[in-house]
Amino acid sequence: MTLRLHDTATRTVRDFLPLTPGKAGLYLCGATVQAPPHIGHIRSGVSFDICVRWLKASGLEVTFCRNVTDIDDKILLTARAEGSPWWAVAERNQRAFTRAYDVLGCLPPDVEPRATGHTPEMIALIGRLVDSGHAYPAGGDVYFDISSYDRYGALSGQRPEHMRAADDIEDGSAKRDPRDFALWKGHKSGEPSWETPWGAGRPGWHLECSAMATKYLGATFDIHGGGLDLVFPHHENEVAQSKAAGDGFARYWLHNGLVRLGGEKMSKSLGNSLLVDAMVAQVRPVELRYYLGQVHYRSDIEYSQEALAEAAAAYRRIEGFVVRVSEGAGTGTGQTLVSGLPPVSSLPAAFAAALDDDLAVPQALAVVHEAVTEGNTALAAGDQAGAAKQAESVRAMLAVLGLDPLAGPWITAGDSGLRDVVAALVSVALGQREAARARRDYAAADAIRAQLHAGGIVVEDTPAGPRWELAR
Ligand SMILES: [Zn+2]
């Protein structure tokens, strides 16, 4: 079965046929670094991390480019409000985004271009558009002439006559048409600016992504991703300016659903309590990742504490099984610290088929949960080999979803070393408890169990002997 993806441009799920066999180029609109990320921002990172992992597991050599918009109206507004330089605001928030991607286990992109490092490419693109009659300088700005591109509106499925004015510039009076959008914004006092043949100024947001995507992935590339809220105007404008300039641009458009709070798109004012830094102080990062990644990437998430708690419980059930089997095997934790991706051939066919079907994670997770149920049944029957087989399969599937509890970043070299030390100490204590029981000194046996419990170790007596785990 081949991978099929939902393409926003055609509104259909269609076969993914890479431009170059064996390779895939993916551009994801990353952070506009005016504030630290809340879970609405980072959901896109998790969704596309699963996409990248699946492309890689499918044997494709992936080039993943995720940009940083480090110059933008909102960054300048934040800087002005707090009296900081614009670049300090951008740096600080970029660090917060990087921390959030890392803490949630998103693989780093192959390249993470910043807009301010790519003004020569942007100026070259504007030059091509002006020369070919698709853009015009006016009042110190440079605008894209939407009437010059007859497919304007095709990506978002709108007719130009029904579109609102582009509100990307405060005084748009120099525009020929209110819907024309700014490729370049003329210099204003107190703002950073770069020199161009049309005067000094700074880039428009849409232009930044077109210039960076084609620089790293080529004039025509495979996949462009982003949140559903970016389809219009951001992506519509990217397509227009790139195709009008003669580039093939993205061949597939993938959009993730949004995180909503009380039915509304999460905004800065609504989302302060849901900043990633604040969230991972309340729940384990791996549980937050499970919560954000478990739904289909195209569905919206209505945030609730209850749903988060349910997701965490579901993950702990899977994790508990994997950890129990690895501890029972008596060979340390069996962890792989480097997150390797298993080849598709080692995965259950139903799991692979689910991900091939437009990255259907809910169906893929159903296969994981079934394997955990079978594995737990095997454990209860004392069938350690049967349980180990299921655990291996579960871990391979979890690796594809970035959720293997015994792989990095969820377990570190320090953790695994300590786990072995803890395992040795607990085994000494359990030996003494068995000895106390053997001599019918149940008070001493209970005291050992209570002391372990006070230290955060839960002991459970099973037909196969006592087993333990860290209290969670
Ligand atoms: Zn973008």
Image (cartoon, grey):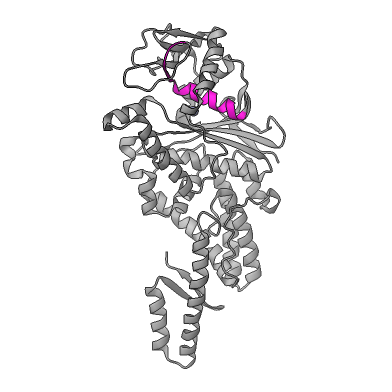
The answer to whether residue 112 is seen in the rendering is yes
Residue 149 falls left or right of residue 31: right
Q: Split into 4 quadrants, where in the image is the C terminus?
A: bottom left
Foreground residue among 197 and 256: 197
Q: Quadrant of residue 328?
A: bottom right
Foreground residue among 292 and 380: 292
Above/below status of 16 relative to 417: above
Above/below status of 212 relative to 381: above
What percent of the width, then of the height, locates residue 403?
53, 53
Q: Quadrant of residue 268?
A: top left
Above/below status of 60 relative to 156: below
* Residue at the front extreme of this rendering: 195
* Residue at the bottom extreme of this rendering: 439
Q: Is residue 268 magenta?
A: no
Q: Quadrant of residue 61?
A: top right
Above/below status of 166 relative to 376: above
Residue 310 falls left or right of residue 342: left
What's the magenta bit mostly, secondary-structure-wise? Answer: helix
What percent of the width, then of the height, locates residue 73?
37, 24
The answer to whether residue 311 is seen in the rendering is no
Foreground residue among 34 and 113: 113
**Residue at (66%, 38%) from the top-left corner?**
3
- Please give the range of residues in magenta: 198-217
What percent of the width, then of the height, locates residue 199?
43, 12
**Residue at (51%, 25%) from the top-left corner?**
118
Q: Split into 4 quadrants, where in the image is the N terminus?
A: top right
For the image shown, how many numbered marks are present on the structure?
0
What percent of the width, then of the height, locates residue 176?
43, 6
Q: Is residue 213 magenta?
A: yes
